[in-house]
Image (tube, rainbow, N blue to C red):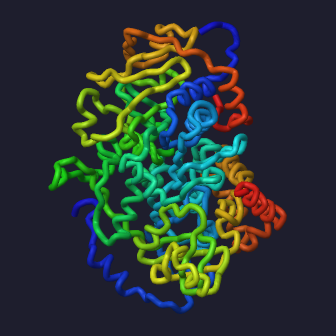
């Protein structure tokens, strides 16, 4: 990466690159943090008819810029929504196939896209207990396309996660389908350094694009497993002024976009 | 006996024996908690994280020091930290446990789970919802694709099966039958018809799944209100055992349409526990719960101006 000070933070570039993946007239299951900012950015730029869905049982709200909710179950999250339902029914809409995208974060992610948000260390005696799945396991199991948005760090991108909270392609190959997960699939992993997709046969992560000015080798150096490079590796253009100013309006105090 | 095996006949018998009376079930909080929350009870808590938490009832359980509790809830927040600080909690069944995204990872949760002071049983959010729903339906399990292939499937030792009709593999989540459900709502009549405004979360299923149900409410309204709009009733009277009038009974949580959450109060709690862990939570319990003596005194300590402001905030958000 260039030595000059970047004009945008890691969280901002992740939000921008996630937003760019969200097509118009789709539904997106959104959690708290960067995903929420990304979904709202997509709505306010290229996808005005993208509908946001929150686990609290909230369908198609119109969030107020600068007044972001601090949980997906509180009153601000449901501002001017089209419909409310129970939490269980919200996830059942997803299991039925109504959710086009699911956006997730991860404490750890491995080469097959499995996610850990439960614990670091061993199951019997965890070194660090994390809050847990929430709806992440359900999104990873049933959303049609799952996008994981995280900062690119070696300690986060590990060979094998300590605990599979939310399934990616499990052991790779056909193992996800063999476990019974026949719907929905891991789609992309978006970081501050680039975007990864999954190899169609091995179901392992492949570097698809790098952020402008980032060397593929630098991405590999920050990844805890062997990361193949796509044949036609592309460069992602940096966030535009419009994308950045929209993000600032969405989250001026950087509550979602910390880091 | 298999894990999750249950005596369905007994579960059913207890509902058959309930009084399904249209007469008044209004009582005070001390009586409701004293009668229906027992040592070792499994209590399902309504609301979600910092929304419609039945805070007043949690305080009363702490004042009565009812021990050995299992707490189940969709997302568990500050209420678990408080019960844990008082040493009343044996097990937490949830999909997520912390005070809230804005305040980082709960140190109380970490100390308790890493030190094995309590059992932290983690399910996916849908799986937990389906556990309540299976009980609400009076059956023993429900099928889903959630948790398949994950370590949540393995650690919880849940069974799966191939569909006898078309062959798909499905995970079978076992029914969860709470001893008592505790729900805070905006309004009820004296017989226990309940209207929940805003998000229902898992409360309707909890009310059907639980053997006993305590409802604390912002206001008690005439039964006529329900007869005029039966389509707006969330929970019918025959599910409910106790109705307790408790304005601001969810504070510092939000109550949709009534008042917003007191983020400063949650922030103060998180600051105490981030600094001193469980001791910090204990300090809070001593000062605000035992020190107040009653929920009304706790609210008085907060001051009428603050509570009015939270109402004003709610009005502004809904504009």
Indicate whether A30 appears above or below B90.
above
Tell me where residue B203 appears, x and y as whole percent.
49, 66
Q: Residue at the location (59% across, 86% down)?
A: B223
Tell me where residue A253 appears, x and y as whole percent.
73, 36
Tell me where residue A186 appears, x and y as whole percent.
38, 32
Q: How many marks?
A: 0
Q: Residue at the location (65% across, 66% down)?
A: B250
Indicate whether A59 appears above or below B176.
above
Q: Residue at the location (64% across, 55% down)?
A: A75
Where on the picture, by quarter, is residue A160?
A: top left
Image quarter where the C terminus of chain A lies is top right
Q: Mark yes or no: residue B99 visible.
A: yes
Answer left or right for B112 relative to A165. Answer: right
Q: Nearer the viewer, residue B164 or B242?
A: B164
**Residue extending farthest bottom:** B23
Answer left or right for B167 relative to A21. Answer: left
Q: Nearer the viewer, residue A14 or B246?
A: A14
Answer left or right for B170 relative to A20. Answer: left
Image quarter where the N terminus of chain A lies is top right
Q: Residue at the location (53% across, 92% down)?
A: B23
Where on the picture, by quarter, is residue A99?
A: top left
Tell me where residue A244 appears, x and y as whole percent.
68, 25
Answer left or right for B234 relative to B249. Answer: left
Indicate whether A256 appears above or below B132.
above
Q: Nearer the viewer, residue B255 or B58?
A: B255
Q: Mark yes or no: residue B31 visible.
A: no
């Amino acid at each position: 990466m260039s030595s000059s000070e970047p004009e945008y933070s890691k969280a901002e570039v992740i939000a921008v690159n996630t937003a760019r993946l969200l097509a118009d007239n789709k539904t997106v299951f959104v959690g708290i943090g960067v995903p929420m900012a990304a979904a709202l950015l997509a709505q306010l730029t290229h996808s005005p008819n993208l509908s946001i869905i929150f686990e609290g049982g909230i369908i198609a709200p119109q969030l107020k810029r600068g007044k972001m909710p601090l949980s997906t179950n509180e009153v601000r999250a449901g501002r001017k929504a089209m419909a409310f339902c129970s939490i269980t029914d919200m996830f059942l809409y997803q299991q039925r196939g109504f959710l086009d995208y699911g956006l997730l974060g991860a404490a750890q992610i491995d080469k097959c896209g499995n996610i850990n948000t439960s614990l670091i260390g061993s199951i019997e005696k965890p070194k660090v207990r994390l809050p847990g799945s929430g709806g992440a396991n359900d999104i990873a199991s049933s959303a049609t396309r799952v996008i994981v948005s995280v900062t690119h760090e070696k300690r986060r991108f590990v060979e094998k996660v300590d605990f599979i909270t939310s399934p990616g392609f499990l052991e790779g190959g056909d193992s996800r389908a063999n476990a019974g997960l026949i719907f929905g699939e891991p789609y992309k992993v978006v970081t501050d350094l680039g975007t990864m997709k999954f190899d169609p046969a091995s179901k392992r992560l492949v570097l698809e694009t790098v952020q402008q000015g980032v060397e593929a080798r630098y991405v590999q150096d920050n990844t805890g497993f062997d990361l193949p490079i796509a044949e036609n590796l592309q460069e992602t253009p940096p966030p535009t002024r419009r994308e950045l100013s929209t993000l600032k309006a969405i989250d001026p105090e950087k509550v979602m976009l910390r880091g | 006996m298999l894990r999750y095996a249950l005596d369905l006949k007994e579960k059913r018998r207890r509902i058959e024996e309930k009084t399904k009376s249209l007469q008044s079930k209004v009582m005070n909080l001390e009586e409701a908690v004293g009668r229906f929350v027992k040592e070792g009870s499994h209590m399902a808590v309504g609301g979600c994280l910092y929304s419609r938490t039945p805070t007043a009832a949690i305080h009363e359980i702490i004042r009565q020091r009812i021990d050995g509790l299992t707490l189940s809830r969709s997302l568990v927040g500050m209420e678990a930290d408080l019960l844990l600080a008082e040493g009343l909690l044996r097990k937490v069944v949830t999909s997520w446990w912390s005070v809230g995204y804005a305040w980082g990872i709960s140190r109380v949760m970490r100390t308790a789970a890493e030190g094995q002071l309590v059992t932290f049983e983690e399910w996916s959010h849908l799986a937990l919802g389906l556990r309540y729903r299976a009980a609400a339906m009076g059956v023993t399990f429900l099928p889903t694709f959630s948790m398949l292939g994950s370590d949540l499937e393995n650690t919880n030792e849940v069974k799966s099966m191939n569909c006898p009709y078309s062959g798909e593999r499905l995970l079978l989540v076992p029914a969860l039958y709470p001893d008592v459900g505790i729900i805070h709502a905006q309004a009820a009549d004296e017989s226990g018809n309940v209207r929940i405004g805003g998000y229902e979360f898992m409360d309707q299923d909890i009310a059907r799944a639980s053997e006993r149900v305590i409802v604390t409410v912002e206001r008690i309204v005439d039964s006529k209100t329900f007869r005029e709009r039966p389509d707006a009733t969330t929970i019918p009277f025959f599910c409910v055992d106790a109705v307790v009038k408790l304005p601001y009974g969810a504070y510092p949580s939000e109550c949709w349409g009534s008042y917003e959450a007191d983020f400063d109060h949650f922030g103060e709690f998180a600051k105490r526990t981030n600094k001193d862990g469980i001791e910090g939570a204990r300090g809070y319990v001593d000062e605000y719960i035992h020190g107040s003596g009653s929920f009304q005194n706790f609210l008085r300590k907060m001051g009428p101006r603050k509570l009015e402001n939270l109402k004003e905030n709610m009005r502004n958000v809904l504009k």
